Image (tube, rainbow, N blue to C red):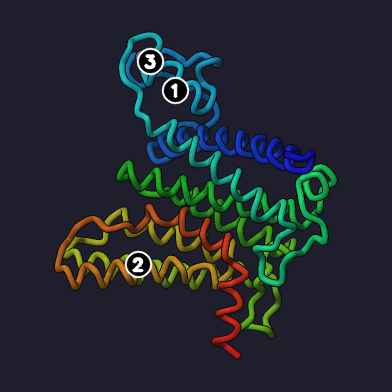
Amino acid sequence: MNAHHAIDLTTALWLGGIGACIGSFLNVVAYRLPIGMSVIWKPSHCPKCRHPIRARDNVPVFGWLWLRGRCRDCGEPISPRYAIVEFLMGLAFFALAYFELFSGGANLPDGPISPLVGAADNVWIPHGPLSGLYAYHALLLSLLVCVTLIDLDRQKVPSKLIGLGLATGVGLAAWFPFLHPAGPRFFEDASIGCSGLTGASIGWVVGMTSARLIALLRRQPLAKAGRNLTAGFIFLGAFLGWQGIFPMAAVLLIAGISILVKNSHKDLITTKSLAPIAMIHLAIWKSLDEIVRSLVS
Ligand SMILES: [Zn+2]
């Protein structure tokens, strides 16, 4: 391993560590926000014995491992979900660092945007737009994971969270147009600043329609799950532009067809697919964009 690879690996592990800490925070947010508890002001405690969790046991993933999944005070099992979310968030930040940050943005439409590769030249000597894009996409993944966790708890995504995600996604892209590298394309005359809002609006329509169709196919009322799925679509559109909602819409279409063909009402992958699909979209964005362009022209 040469020095460049060592710097890349160390940097990716450091960013992965940040991702795991954010995963730990998302576990708390997803539990507390829907029941109206303060996200910041109360320290974590064991849900069974209410004993506060010690700082040294609160280390993402490892805390759960060295306690062997049990509370230090009452011995009650702690769900592995917390550690799994922390691990997957760490993994996502780690992978995103390699294919977006260290590659100089080779995954982006019109990428690479930095002439250099590697962490030394793109992170430690920061490339502004590239660092911004990494943080922006990391924020999108965090929001989608939060929506997924709330959905798994059968709670509904609070309006507060939808508003916050929408405002940051649209607002940041209006302020820093490089955050939307795909641009509006079909709407060349509209200002770039509208691309987040256009994406979020189309995301809302596609999300609502998908949720209604799924409810219809399952012969179930449009419940919390429909609202959560729509929230995910709004975030995809706000952060990635209207192009970003179509991979997820395609997955739902396939899921819908398989419900019709098999005539089953099984709980098929829906909201759970949001974050993995956003990740795949980011990884192969350049190729997806080339396909869209060749279809349009
Ligand atoms: Zn306990």
Residue situated in front as seen by the camera: 230 or 87: 87
What quarter of the picture does the N terminus occupy? Answer: top right
**10 Å crowding of disc 3: few (<14), some (14-19), many (20+):** many
Q: Which residue is mark 3?
A: 71
Mark 1 and mark 2 lie on one chain; the one further toward the N terminus is 1
- Residue 197 in percent (x, y) is at 59, 69
Dot placed on the residue nearer the N-terminal end, 3 or 2? 3
Q: Which mark is residue 252?
A: 2
Residue 218 position (above or below residue 131): below
Secondary structure found at label 1: helix
Label 3 beta carbon within 8 A of ligand 1: yes
How far apart are the alpha carbons under marks 3 and 2?
39 Å
User: The disc labelled 3 sits on which kind of residue?
Assistant: Cys
Residue under label 1: 64
For the C terminus, the image quarter is: bottom right
Q: Quick one: SS at disc 3?
A: loop
Q: Are marks 3 and 1 in contact (CB under 8 Å)?
A: no
- Residue 109 at what x, y percent from top left? 66, 70
**Which residue is at a point 70% across and 77% down the rendered structure image?**
191
